[in-house]
Image: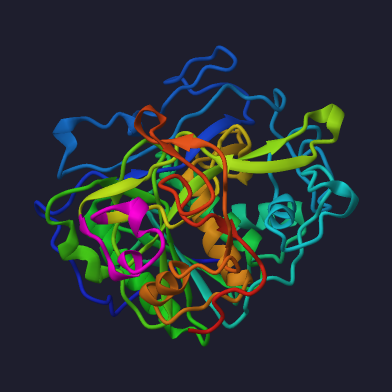
């Protein structure tokens, strides 16, 4: 469907020295395409990075980069959908997660005899509120957004995107530069597809920032918040990007505000903390890994643990917020804002199926991971669970007075520099209070 312009931006932010390097945290493991990109390596199983990932110190305050890694294609010489659209993946025999398998893992549908096998379980389409909005904020234009989302939805038996449930908004009022091949296009594909997959009835809005500077992304966040606040039940804003913390970051915390809007940001795919995930006005989403049996064991789901590469830890500059200082997690967190708050699947060795036709000629299906996946998954599942809060503070206030009903703790695994942090029987710097649950959620706060 055609994109629409946005007028009446909710404030603007100067793009001078306050524009800083931002990393989109998508982690792409494998692409189904005819050949590896010329800027990569062609040996099977070897990671390569697109040029946009070559961030250098000289870019600080000027440029922003995606954070994407890829492997040589695994799924065949020619990337075509080889299976009928029956709610199942385009290629069988892989342990890559699907909309249905994720809904199953997180308890939003019964595993039954499938043990959440991604090659067998199909998604429910009744999840999410049609009176709510999930807004996705990414940089640059993704010209195939509607077409790619339509193909993804058809493959997995999800509602097709229409003018009623999907739109693209230009945060600056005019179309941004074409982001095809930049990495931001596959980031946007991941984000809109898995917000839609987890909450098929919610309206999805892709808000495209003029550039990948903090200034333009923050303007887009404000635009996104305006759209979410206008929905009857409010909703979520999902941000799968971030950058190194900086001393004056707290001056931007007010960007993440809006009535009936909860903001989610990725914790990153390396040890340490990033902004805006450490903002006290943001739900910071860390990463988990799924443990599955192999093909001989029917890819049975066996549990989840902390992803070793997830971001997390005490903030460098953000003070300890009240919702943490008054909680049982305070003794673990210490004197500064702790991250993450929650977590979901991020390990690219599990990964999720993503449909994108703009990053690589001839490529369609990709295996993608990173906390870029965890963030829209969490936003979508909270929508599906009916977790609509007055704002992020209200959400976090309930979460940190944890009763066990809101999340399922992840009790094993390590993360951080030298694997210094461990998941366990309470809040942790790897996964916060854990992964989504469908029942007894936050409801309307």
Q: In the shown orientation, is residue 120 left or right of residue 40?
A: right
The furthest residue to the left: 17
In the displayed structure, 159 sits above or below 147; it is below
Give the residue at x 53% y 14%. 42
Identity of the residue drawn at 51% across and 78% down: 388
Which residue does the image show at 13% across and 54% down from the upper left? 18
Counting from the top left corner in percent of width and height, residue 280 is at: 30, 64
- Which is nearer the eye, 323 or 193? 323
Horizontal and vertical percent for residue 107?
72, 60
Q: Of residues 147 and 306, which is closer to you in this image?
A: 306
Residue at left offset 85%, top offset 32%:
297
Choose top left, top right, bottom left or bottom right for residue 103.
bottom right
Q: Is residue 333 magenta?
A: yes
Q: Assign the N terminus to one quadrant of the image.
A: bottom right
123 vs 233: above or below? above
Residue 329 covered by magenta stretch: yes
Q: How is the image coloured?
A: rainbow
Q: Residue furthest top?
A: 43
Whether residue 394 is visible to the viewer of this picture, yes or no, is yes
Range of residues picked out in magenta: 318-336
**Residue 145 location (% of width, % of height):** 53, 55
In the rendered view, would you say 143 is above or below 293?
below
Occupied quadrant, residue 356: top right
**In this image, 429 relative to 370: left or right?**
left
188 or 422, which lies in front?
Answer: 422
Q: Is residue 106 above or below residue 67?
A: below
Can you give x and y, in whole percent of width and height, for residue 430 in the image?
Answer: 45, 44
Say how many tags the image has.
0
Q: Residue furthest right?
A: 113
Residue 360 seen in the figure: no
Residue 361 is left or right of residue 393, and the answer is right
């Amino acid at each position: 469907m055609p994109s629409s312009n946005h007028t009446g931006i909710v404030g603007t932010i100067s793009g001078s020295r306050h524009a800083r390097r931002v990393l989109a945290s998508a982690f792409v493991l494998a692409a189904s395409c005819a050949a590896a990109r010329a800027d990569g390596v062609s040996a099977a199983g070897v990671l390569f990075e697109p040029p946009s990932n070559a961030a250098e110190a000289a870019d600080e305050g000027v440029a922003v980069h995606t954070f994407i890694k890829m492997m040589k294609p695994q799924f065949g010489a020619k990337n075509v959908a080889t299976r009928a659209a029956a709610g199942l993946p385009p290629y069988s025999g892989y342990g890559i997660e699907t909309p249905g398998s994720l809904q199953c893992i997180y308890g939003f549908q019964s595993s039954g005899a499938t043990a959440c096998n991604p090659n067998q379980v199909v998604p429910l389409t009744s999840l999410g509120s049609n009176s709510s909005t999930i807004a996705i904020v990414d940089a640059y234009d993704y010209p195939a957004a509607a077409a790619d989302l339509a193909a993804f939805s058809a493959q997995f038996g999800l509602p097709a995107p229409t003018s009623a449930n999907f739109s693209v908004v230009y945060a600056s009022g005019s179309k941004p530069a074409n982001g095809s091949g930049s990495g931001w296009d596959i980031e946007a594909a991941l984000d809109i597809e898995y917000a839609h997959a987890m909450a098929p009835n919610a309206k999805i809005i892709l808000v495209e920032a003029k550039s990948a500077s903090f200034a333009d992304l923050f303007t887009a966040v404000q635009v996104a918040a305006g759209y979410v606040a206008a929905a009857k039940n409010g909703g979520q804003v999902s941000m799968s990007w971030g950058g190194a913390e900086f001393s004056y970051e707290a001056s931007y915390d007010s960007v993440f505000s809006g009535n009936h809007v909860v903001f989610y940001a990725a914790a990153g795919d390396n040890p340490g903390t990033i902004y805006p995930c450490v903002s006290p006005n943001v739900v910071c989403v860390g990463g988990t890994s799924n443990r599955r049996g192999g093909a001989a064991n029917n890819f049975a789901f066996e549990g989840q643990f902390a992803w070793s590469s997830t971001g997390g830890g005490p903030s460098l500059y953000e003070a300890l917020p009240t919702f943490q200082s008054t909680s049982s997690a305070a003794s673990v967190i210490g004197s500064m804002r702790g991250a993450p708050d929650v977590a979901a699947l991020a390990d690219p060795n599990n990964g999720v199926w993503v449909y994108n036709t703009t990053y690589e000629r001839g490529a369609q299906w990709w295996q993608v991971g990173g906390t870029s996946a965890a963030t829209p998954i969490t936003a979508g599942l909270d929508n599906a669970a009916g977790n609509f809060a007055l704002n992020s503070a209200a959400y976090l206030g309930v979460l940190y007075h944890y009763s066990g009903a809101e999340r399922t703790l992840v009790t094993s695994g390590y993360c951080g520099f030298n694997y210094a942090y461990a998941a366990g029987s309470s809040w942790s710097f790897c996964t916060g209070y854990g992964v989504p649950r469908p029942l007894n959620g936050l409801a309307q706060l």
